[in-house]
Image (spheres, helix red, strand yellow):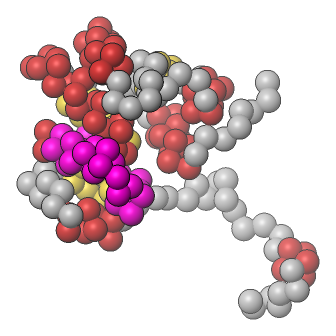
Amino acid sequence: TEPPVPPPYAARQVLELAEGLDRTRFDVEVIHLKTGGALEEAARHRGLACWSPASRAGLDLGAVRRLADHLRDRRFDIVLAQNQYATIVTALACRRLGSAAPRWMSAFHSSPGHIGRGLADQALFGLYKLVLRYSAGLVFVSEIQRKVWRDLGFPRRCASTVITNGVDTDRFRPGPEAGIRAQFGWNGDD
């Protein structure tokens, strides 16, 4: 079949991580909050198990309940939530499960500059800051990013690590560039 439309960059990272885990050691599932879309299509195309709580707009407490039920039923050991909204939904679902909850972590792929200035945006940001206190750890893509979030008062006592974005050197090899440089009028040393 035709490859699906690529999902956004951060979602592609999730798919590559899920695809790269040893399937003899790990039962991997991609959970996406909204049904359908490029992430779900790409996950299925890659043969990855995926599931959705079918979240609606806003903070959907029904989706939180459905995610909690799914995490309990599947008995996950760990969940890696990506970015703000997924982290909040994951944290609330795990809180609902109490001691039966899996450990969860949050991966940051953005900067605080994307957060709106409206009242609803600020309330969501405050909730995000609150729930991160209960995570097993935070993952940042650069030391600068970690510093920016920490300067905003994000949990300093929470374990964190930096995993820089890598480049798949098998996929992104240098190729014949002379023709491309000439096409744009560039010299060989530009």
Q: Nearer the viewer, residue 21 or 45?
A: 45
Dividing the image into 4 quarters, which one contains the C terminus? bottom right
Q: Is residue 52 left or right of residue 102?
A: right
Residue 111 spot, x, y in % from top left = 38, 61
Q: Is residue 127 magenta?
A: yes
Above or below residue 160? Residue 181 is below
Residue 102 spot, x, y in % from top left = 21, 25
Q: Nearer the viewer, residue 99 or 86?
A: 86
Report the residue that reaches farthest toward the top: 73
Q: Is residue 24 left or right of residue 37?
A: left
Above or below residue 84? Residue 49 is above
Q: Which quarter of the figure has residue 79?
A: top left
Kindly tell me whether residue 137 is visible in this rendering.
no
Kindly tell me whether residue 114 is visible in this rendering.
yes
Residue 143 spot, x, y in % from top left = 31, 68
| Residue at horizontal 39 percent and vertical 63 percent from the top | 113
- Residue range highlighted in magenta: 105-131
| Residue at horizontal 66 percent and vertical 41 percent from the top | 6
Above or below residue 41? Residue 169 is below
Q: Which quarter of the figure has residue 155?
A: bottom left
| Residue at horizontal 59 percent and vertical 23 percent from the top | 36
Q: Is residue 72 magenta?
A: no
Residue 39 spot, x, y in % from top left = 57, 33
| Residue at horizontal 23 percent and vertical 32 percent from the top | 91
Dividing the image into 4 quarters, which one contains the N terminus? top right
